[in-house]
Image (cartoon, rainbow, N blue to C red):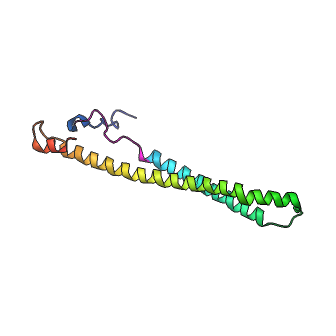
Amino acid sequence: MSPESAQMPPNWRELGFDGDPVPGDPQVLQGIVDDFTYLRDTAWSVSQGLDAFVASASGGFAGATADALREVVSGRLKTFIFNIARAFSLAGEAVAEYKLALVQAQQVAADALRQAAGLAVGDAKLAGLKR
């Protein structure tokens, strides 16, 4: 980054903070949401594949062993995969909600910093903006 394009970091001390009062990168959080969504969708695809496997009775895969495998796949394995999909779904929703709250809080902090710009140290408006 060239010196001309580099921006000075905001002076949060004007508002009584030693640094950014709301740190965090919404883009990083969106990447996590996207990853969780991909993993959720992958788990759902596996679940559908397991359903197809259990439903197939042809292809020469018959007998007691085949029935036992189908029972395990349709029971414990299917439940396990469902729980994985649900966990990634819930985690993605939680991170998305956190991202939204972070963006809103960062906007509030940035607005307060803009309002504080140029105010004198003893200004009542500045005192009202401080934490």
Direction from residue 23 to residue 50 in the image, left or right: right
- Magenta stretch prevailing secondary structure: loop
The boundaries of the magenta stretch are: 16-26
- Please tell me which residue lies in front, 55 or 12: 55
Return the residue nearer the eye: 117 or 75: 75
Does residue 115 appear left or right of residue 66 in this picture? left
Residue 106: x percent and y percent? 32, 47
Residue 124: x and y, percent? 10, 43
Screen quadrant of the N terminus: top left
Q: Position of residue 4 (x, y in %)?
A: 33, 35
Query: Residue 44: percent from the left, percent from the top?
Result: 64, 59
Q: From where the camera sits, is residue 2 visible? A: yes
Residue sitting at x 89%, y 62%: 63
Residue 19 part of the magenta segment: yes
The answer to whether 84 appears left or right of 122 in the picture is: right
- Is residue 11 visible in the rendered image? The answer is no
Residue 68 falls in image quadrant: bottom right
Q: Residue at 56% across / 52% down in the picture?
A: 88
Residue 52 colored magenta?
A: no
